[in-house]
Amino acid sequence: MLDFKKLPLKTVAKLMNFYPPFLGASIRVKLVDPMKFEISMPLNMSNKNYVGTQFGGSLYAMTDPFYMLILMNKLGKDYLVWDKSASIYFRSPGRGRVSAFFEIDDQKVEEIKKEVENRGKTEPVFKVNVLNDEGKVVAQVEKVLWVAKKSKS
């Protein structure tokens, strides 16, 4: 069995393009620098809903794991990082290609580390907009992660 945690993030990003939920919805994953993802999805028969716009489940799927992946890689092996919850707010119909961009700046990572040191865990909140090609917001997604130090046992 392939251990994705041992692979470089660039390789993981390439392999994610073949992950069945992404492949089935035509979601494309691109690592644009060492810790920044660009995700895109065209409108086509594999992700079109009954009224001819982007299926909401596909819009959410394209935003699902990326904050967790980035944070896991930035914090390192001494931390546990899990997705805790998410919500999506649909702002306008997706009628063409949509995209989302994911990154976590180093200042936020340091804040998370300090919170874990002080409280034993933290639940940082991240927000991302799914945009159409004109830059209009199609959906807003809020992700809550759960972060703690691994026990030394």
Image (spheres, rainbow, N blue to C red):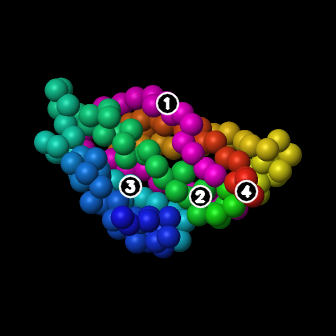
User: Residue at (73%, 56%) from the top-left corner?
Assistant: 153
Marks 4 and 1, how far apart at CA: 35 Å
Q: Look at mark 3 in the image and give the residue it sits on.
A: 39
In the depicted structure, whether residue 142 falls above or below residue 21: above
Which callout, 4 or 1, points at the residue further toward the start of the chain? 1
Disc 2 vs disc 4: which is toward the camera? 4
Task: Give the residue at x 46% y 49%.
Answer: 65
Which label's residue is closer to the chain start, 3 or 2?
A: 3
In the image, residue 96 lies in the stretch drawn in magenta: yes
Residue occupying image coordinates x 35% and y 60%: 16
Instruction: Give the mark, 1 or 3, whose residue is nearer the N terminus.
Output: 3
The residue sitting at the left extreme is: 45
Identity, as a three-letter code, of the amino acid under mark 4: Ser
The residue beneath circle 1 is 87
Q: Which residues are magenta?
A: 80-109
The verdict on residue 26 being magenta is: no
Q: Label 3: how many residues lie within 10 Å, few (<14), some (14-19) or many (20+)?
A: many
Query: Local crowd at mark 2 within 10 Å, few (<14), some, or many (≥20)?
Result: some
Q: Nearer the viewer, mark 4 or mark 1?
A: 4
Q: Amino acid at mark 1?
A: Ser
In the image, what residue type sits under mark 3?
Ile
Quadrant where the image shows the N terminus? bottom left
Per the image, the residue denoted by label 2 is 72
| Whether label 4 touches label 3, CB < 8 Å | no
Q: In the picture, residue 28 is in which quadrant? A: bottom left
Q: Secondary structure at mark 1?
A: strand
Query: Which residue in the structure is indicated by mark 4?
Result: 153
